[in-house]
Every structure is written in C-alpha cells, then in structure tokens.
Amino acid sequence: MSVLALQEFGFSVAGLLAGAVNYAYYILFGAIIASIVFSWLFPGYPSNSFMQAVYDAVRAVTNPILMPIRSRLPMLRLGGIGLDLSPIVAIIALSIARRLLLVIIDQFIRPVTG
C-alpha cells in the first residue's frame, strides 16, 4: 500500500509511527511501574497462581530493560535498606528515547510522507 493510498483513508504514516512510539512508551512505563509495585508487595515469588502469571509477564517485559542497568548500577545502600535505582534510570532513558524518536518522526518522516 502506498503512502498516497494511506492518506486517502485519512492515515498519516508519521502519525501512525508517532502513535506506535507513544503506545510502546506507555506500555513499557506501566510495566516498569508494575514491576516496582510487585517488588514492594511481593518481596519473594507470589503464592497466588494468577499473581504469579502477572508477575512473570511483567518480569518478562521489564527484565531485558532493567537487568543491563542493574549490572552496571549498584544498589544504593541506606543503612539496612537497599534502593534499586535501575527503574528510575530506565524511565528517564525511555523518556529521552521517546522524545528523540518523536523529533525524528516529526522532522524527517513527516515532510517526506505528508
């Protein structure tokens, strides 16, 4: 399907790409927040089978993002409490990546595709 055919139906390629970037950002952002909440509520593995499935799904999405950051950024020790800063770094990095992608789409793809 050509760009002109998409524009006839009211779709913009740049708009679709920007929407996909935004959806991906919010899904990853929500998964990271869910991972933080799970780590507070369930320090170990949840005993409920439904919560186990949700926990595994959230971890499957967030571990590829958070594990490389955790390997390079040690936990912050505050007395007897350890604070994991990797979700904060991941959210900041995702925000920067989202903004850069939206600028690229707006500056380079939108002028070409309309």
Image: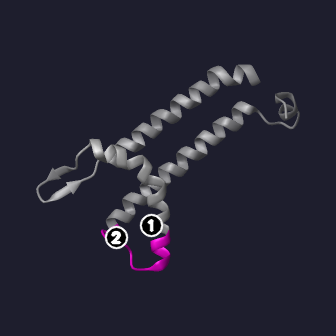
Is residue 38 rendered magenta in the image? no
Where's residue 35, x and y in %? 41, 59
Callout 1: 10 Å neighbours few (<14), some, many (20+)?
Answer: some
> With respect to residue 29, does 38 lie above or below?
below
Callout 2: 10 Å neighbours few (<14), some, many (20+)?
Answer: few
Which region is colored magenta?
Answer: 41-53
**Mark drawn on residue 42:** 2
Residue at 32 percent of width and 65 percent of height:
40
Where's residue 41, x and y in %? 34, 69
Instruction: Tell me if residue 106 can be seen.
Output: yes
Q: Secondary structure at mark 2?
A: loop
Check the picture and name the quadrant holding the C terminus. top right
**Mark drawn on residue 19:** none
**Front residue of this view, candidates 14 and 74:** 74
Check the picture and name the quadrant holding the N terminus. top right
Residue contact between numbered discs 2 and 1, judged by CB atoms under 8 Å = yes
Q: State left or right for residue 41 relative to residue 99.
A: left
Where's residue 103, x and y in %? 57, 26
Instruction: Tell me if residue 114 can be seen.
Output: no
Q: State left or right for residue 29 relative to residue 76.
A: right
Residue at 43 percent of width and 55 percent of height:
33
Place residue 69 in its image quadrant. Answer: top left
Q: Which residue is mark 1?
A: 55
Please, what is the three-letter code of the amino acid marked with disc 2? Answer: Phe
In the displayed image of the protein, which residue is found farthest to the bottom? 48
Query: Gap between marks 2 and 1, in whole Å?
Result: 9 Å
Q: State left or right for residue 9 relative to residue 82.
A: right
Q: Earlier in the sequence, mark 2 or mark 1?
A: 2
Is residue 46 rendered magenta in the image? yes
Q: State left or right for residue 42 relative to residue 10.
A: left
Residue at 22 percent of width and 50 percent of height:
75
